[in-house]
Amino acid sequence: MQAMQMGLLADENGVVPKEVRRKAWELLKIGELHDVLEIEDLQRKNAQRECVYFESGVVPEDDKYGDDEIHLEEHLRYALSNDYRLLSKSSPEYAALFDAHIEKHRQKLAQRQQTAQRNAMRMAATIQKGANK
């Protein structure tokens, strides 16, 4: 806990990455978070399974229940692996489809961030209007 307070676990922007928080929760055995961690693990396994599908020549359908942030993280982990390098040599068409799949996750995350920013600006404007009355 002291390491977090000292900022030792934060990135260069002062944010503690999701994976670091998850590991800390596991180590602290915080009961309420068990369900959250279990769902995150399922999301990770699903994203890893999608990577295997691409290796097998199967393009997975879009998963409406998938967590784009977790999926993107797992897909990038795969993209940096030797397995992906082999896929890009043996089946460049599936590697290209995998790259497009990653881009879809990035676009969804960007849209969500833009929506959150617009909502925050609207909220701030509403609060400002109320303060000016």
Image (tube, rainbow, N blue to C red):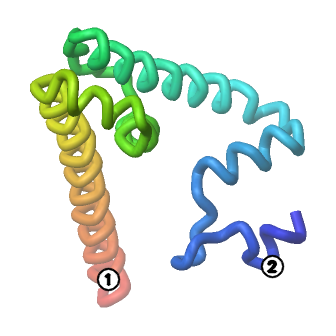
**Around disc 2, counting alpha carbons within 10 Å, would you say few (fewer than 14), some (14 to 19), or many (20 or more)?**
few
Of all residues shown, which one is farthest toward the bottom?
A: 132
**Quick one: 107 or 123, which is closer to the camera?**
107
Q: Position of residue 61 (x, y in %)?
A: 21, 14
Query: Quick one: quadrant of the C terminus?
Result: bottom left
Between residues 69 and 120, which one lies in front from this camera angle?
A: 69
Residue 95: image x %, image y %?
Answer: 20, 30
34 or 95: nearer the viewer? 95
**Which residue position is annotated with label 2?**
6
Amino acid type, label 1 = Gln
Tell me where residue 10 appears, x and y as whole percent: 65, 70
Whole-number angstrom distance, CA of label 1 to CA of label 2: 35 Å
Give SS at disc 2: loop
Position of the N terminus by quadrant: bottom right
Q: Position of residue 79 (x, y in %)?
A: 35, 40
Image point 88% across, 37% down: which residue? 29
The 10 Å Cα crowd at callout 1, few under 14, some 14 to 19, many 20 or more, is few
Say if 46 sits above or below 112 in the image.
above
Residue at (38, 17) in percent of width and height: 52
Q: Is residue 6 above or below residue 41?
A: below
Q: Amino acid at mark 2?
A: Met
- Tell how many labels: 2
Q: Which residue is mark 1?
A: 128
